[in-house]
Image (spheres, rainbow, N blue to C red):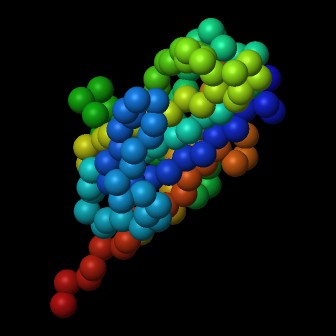
Amino acid sequence: MLSSIRATLLLGDHAQVADGKLNVIGAGWTMTGPQAAPFALAALIEFPWTEAGTTHAARFELLDSEGIPVEVPTPEGEQPVFIQVEFHVGAGFGVPKGTPLVQPIALNSGPQPIPPGGRYEWRLLVDGETEETWRVAFSTRPMQKAA
């Protein structure tokens, strides 16, 4: 099944799902910081018609340039940064049989303490599996040296 799923990920300033459509404002950025800023992670996951009526889990993991999960301080100690959602793949009324089924996902986050001066990527896993193309990369600017 994994090879029959397609996914597109975008970074933006804000995202929402309305009437089955994905709306993203400020989409396509690849550079942020060095200060932490709010952001949106948006995805379109396309399933084959045969997946109608199924439930899936999407997990978005933040990795550094070495592919290692990024950890941030929490009250429970250092924890990896990830977002997980479950969703039901449905075929709306009137959708012709055989039509690919697209699941839009919009995730808005407050600022995360991601270290400046690095290269990172969000990786999508669907039901614990991923593909090389299910990623979106970005960089954080280095801190300015005091003059």
**Looking at the rendering, which quadrant does residue 21 occupy?**
top left
Picture layout, residue 25 above or below residue 129: below
**Is residue 111 shown left or right of residue 119?**
left
Q: Quadrant of the C terminus?
A: bottom left
Residue at 55% x, 47% y: name it: 9
Q: Nearer the viewer, residue 111 or 23?
A: 23
Residue at 51% x, 18% y: name it: 87
Q: Position of residue 51 (x, y in %)?
A: 70, 16
Q: Residue furthest left?
A: 147
**Is residue 84 shown left or right of residue 35?**
right
**Is residue 40 shown left or right of residue 125?**
left
Residue 116 visible in the shown view:
no
Q: Position of residue 84 (x, y in %)?
A: 46, 26
Q: Residue furthest bottom?
A: 147
Q: Position of residue 85 (x, y in %)?
A: 46, 23
Q: Quadrant of the N terminus?
A: top right
Residue at 55% x, 29% y: name it: 103
Residue 120 visible in the shown view:
yes
Q: What number of labels is visible?
A: 0
Residue at 39% x, 54% y: name it: 12
Picture layout, residue 115 above or below residue 132: below
**Looking at the rendering, which quadrant does residue 92 occupy?**
top right
Q: Nearer the viewer, residue 137 or 99?
A: 99
**Looking at the rendering, which quadrant does residue 65 occupy?**
bottom right
Q: Nearer the viewer, residue 144 or 40?
A: 40
Picture layout, residue 65 above or below residue 133: below
Q: Position of residue 106 (x, y in %)?
A: 41, 37
Q: Residue furthest front?
A: 94
